[in-house]
């Protein structure tokens, strides 16, 4: 990967930077999910409360992503990445306050930063990545999400046990601020195309207009809604299911969550490589959807009598599929976007994708109570996985 931005930053460096932004932002957002039973007990709410907390993070992300076109024009992708980290750090500090209103406000604030990570990263990478390598490059960038989740699963329960659950979000906040400072020397070189005179007007939300007017992007938005629902259902509820329904300790469940995220990293890299090698990105997305249906149905039967190795094997296989879609999905999105609108469309696509997370985590929290357990609620996940697969089959039938 020898491409350059035109301002002296090689592709490998830009890819490292945007992946780090994605990873640290994700780590910060998932620290409470990784310690949900302890947090819930301390602040006096049901453990299913964590679903609403994650929903608020993604509500903020969905809100900000619709205006990504304006943000990128006004400040440029480098500054937008820094702003996203500062907002995530501020949200993490607020989430460390043992109060339901403050956690809720901090989660929403966190989401405003989190929603800026994809459009800024997509814009920087689209400039310098050859078309025949986009699947693997965007897949590498998207490994920041499971890497961040793996960090949360490995570190948050341990710090919670030793220093209290508030320590994990505070560590995330410090990492966000530090990375924002580290990126400063490259900001001007990455943002030479910005327009400081850009104003917030009707064109600020053109991303949604573009997506709505293009049938393939509309269907992809529906698929993204469903696939995101599945991915965050695993991230958010894996620890809770293992602790409450499989008799795992918090630290043991956190270790499984870390393995889930590691499998997500491997899945994204392998599927991205295969997609570029064989030119079958959209076909792979359909195959992942079918696998997700099977995984969601199997999740309903998890029980204390499952051997530990079977639990690990199941979660690893399921997550390799449920997490492996994002880089290929982003590539398909920017490939179908109008010229020079990669970052704008990537940001706009965040609205339906994040909406899937919002609806998914909140709905599963409610359905878990109605259906008797969180694992039983994965029947809904299976249905949505099937719908997402059908939507992508529709996309395959449309011309670029």
Image (cartoon, grey):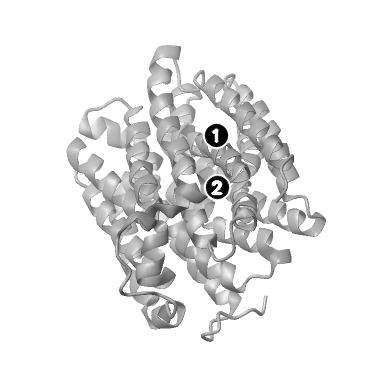
Q: Is residue 210 left or right of residue 67?
A: right
Which of the pair 60/149 is nearer the observer? Answer: 60
Q: Is residue 140 above or below residue 49?
A: below
Where is residue 46? Give x, y as percent: 30, 25
Q: Could you tell me which quadrant the N terminus lies in?
A: bottom right
Which of the pair 347/235 is nearer the observer? Answer: 347
The residue carrying pointer 1 sits among few (fewer than 14), some (14 to 19) or many (20 or more) residues within 10 Å by Cα, namely many
The residue carrying mark 1 is 226
Marker disc for residue 176: none
Q: Is residue 245 above or below residue 119?
A: above
Where is residue 173? Give x, y as percent: 30, 59
Residue shown at 73% from the left, 38% from the top: 287
Marker disc for residue 261: 2
Q: Earlier in the sequence, mark 1 or mark 2?
A: 1
Dots 1, 2 in contact, CB < 8 A: no
Residue shown at 32% from the left, 52% from the top: 112
Of labels 1 and 2, the one closer to you: 1
The residue carrying pointer 2 sits among few (fewer than 14), some (14 to 19) or many (20 or more) residues within 10 Å by Cα, namely many
Which of the pair 157/270 is nearer the observer? Answer: 270
């Amino acid at each position: 990967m020898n491409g350059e931005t035109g301002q002296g930053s090689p592709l490998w460096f830009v890819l490292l930077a945007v992946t780090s932004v994605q990873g640290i932002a994700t780590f910060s957002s998932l620290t409470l999910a990784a310690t949900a039973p302890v947090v819930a007990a301390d602040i006096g709410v049901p453990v299913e409360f964590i679903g609403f907390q994650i929903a608020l993070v993604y509500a903020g992300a969905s809100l900000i992503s619709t205006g990504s076109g304006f943000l990128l024009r006004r400040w440029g992708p480098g500054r937008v990445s820094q702003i996203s980290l500062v907002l995530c750090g501020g949200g993490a500090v607020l989430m460390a306050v043992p109060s339901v209103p403050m956690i809720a406000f901090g989660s929403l604030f966190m989401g405003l930063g989190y929603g800026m990570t994809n459009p800024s990263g997509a814009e920087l990478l689209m400039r310098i990545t050859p078309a025949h390598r986009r699947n693997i490059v965007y897949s590498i960038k998207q490994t920041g999400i499971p890497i961040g989740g793996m960090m949360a699963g490995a570190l948050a329960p341990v710090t919670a046990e030793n220093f209290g659950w508030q320590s994990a979000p505070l560590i995330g906040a410090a990492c966000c601020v530090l990375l924002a400072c580290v990126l400063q020397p490259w900001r001007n070189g990455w943002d030479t195309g910005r327009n400081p005179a850009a104003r917030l007007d009707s064109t600020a939300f053109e991303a949604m207009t573009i997506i709505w007017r293009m049938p393939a992007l509309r269907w992809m938005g529906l698929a993204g809604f469903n696939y995101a629902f599945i991915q965050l259902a695993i991230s958010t509820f894996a620890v809770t299911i293992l602790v409450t329904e499989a008799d795992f300790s918090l630290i043991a469940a956190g270790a499984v969550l870390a393995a889930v995220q590691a499998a997500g990293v491997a899945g994204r890299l392998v599927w991205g490589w295969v997609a570029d090698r064989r030119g079958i990105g959209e076909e792979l997305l359909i195959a992942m959807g079918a696998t997700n249906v099977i995984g969601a149905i199997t999740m309903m039967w998890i029980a204390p009598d499952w051997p530990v190795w079977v639990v690990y094997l199941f979660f690893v296989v399921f997550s390799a599929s449920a997490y492996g879609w994002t880089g290929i999905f982003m590539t398909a999105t920017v490939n179908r976007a109008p010229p020079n609108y990669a970052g704008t469309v990537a940001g706009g696509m965040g609205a339906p994708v994040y909406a899937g997370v919002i609806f998914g985590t909140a709905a599963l929290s409610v359905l878990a109570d109605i259906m008797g357990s969180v694992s039983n609620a994965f029947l809904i996940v299976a249905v949505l996985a099937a719908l997402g697969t059908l939507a992508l089959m529709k996309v395959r039938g449309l011309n670029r």
